[in-house]
Image (cartoon, grey):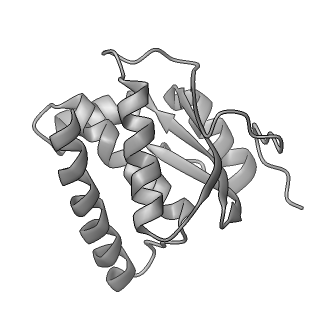
Amino acid sequence: MTEFPNYQPDGGKTIHFEYLKPLPFSLAEDIVSQWLLDSCHAESRAVLSITVVFCSDPYLQEINSRYLDKECYTDIISFPYQNNPIEGDLFVSIDRVIENAREYGNGEVKQELYRVLIHGVLHLCGYEDKEDADRQQMTKQEDLYLQKISILS
């Protein structure tokens, strides 16, 4: 089996949040957890455990370099350990989320974080985004689930 960072085969809580870098706002973990679980269930996936690690650009770039052989910044990296039930880790660069909210969005960091989280979860559900058609399908699903979190939060 491939070695991945942070792998914990015993799981623990279904959705677990780790803060290596603090968020610029308070995250309603119970609401976000339920949203992510509901999204997985809508994709016909059970969830064993998902760990979300909030970190910095340098931390995520080191993971990107070590495990994916890429030398660039990214907003999220998904490590799926198994597909159904889902078991995996999501590493999220808070620095990138803030920058992307400024550059591509309307400055709404929380909304950008939700977009990145659902993107990572969709990767854990098996979605790819390398080809245009796959990216369009993934964006369609992201938009669908983002409408649901906007109602909850």
Q: Give coordinates of residue 52: x percent, y percent.
A: 56, 36
Residue found at the very far bottom of the displayed protein: 133
- Given residues 33 and 54, the one toward you in this image is 33
Say whether residue 115 is visible. yes
- Given residues 140 and 105, the one toward you in this image is 140
Count the numbered circles shown.
0
Q: Is residue 59 above or below residue 133?
A: above
Which residue sits at x=41%, y=81%?
131
Q: Is residue 63 above or below residue 136?
A: above
- Quarter holding the C terminus is top left
Which residue sits at x=10%, y=37%?
106
- Given residues 129 and 142, the one toward you in this image is 142
Q: In this view, does 1 lie to the left or right of 153?
A: right
Residue 33: image quadrant is top left
Say whether residue 117 is visible. no
Residue found at the very far right of the displayed protein: 1
Residue found at the very far left of the displayed protein: 106
Residue 55: image quadrant is top right
- Quarter holding the N terminus is bottom right
Residue 51: image quadrant is top right
Which residue sits at x=46%, y=62%?
41
Q: Give coordinates of residue 39: x percent, y percent.
A: 40, 57
Q: Give coordinates of residue 141: x percent, y percent.
A: 30, 67
Which residue sits at x=38%, y=36%?
32
Q: Give coordinates of residue 138: x percent, y percent.
A: 35, 70
Q: In this view, does 59 lie above or below 115?
A: above
- Given residues 127 and 45, the one toward you in this image is 45
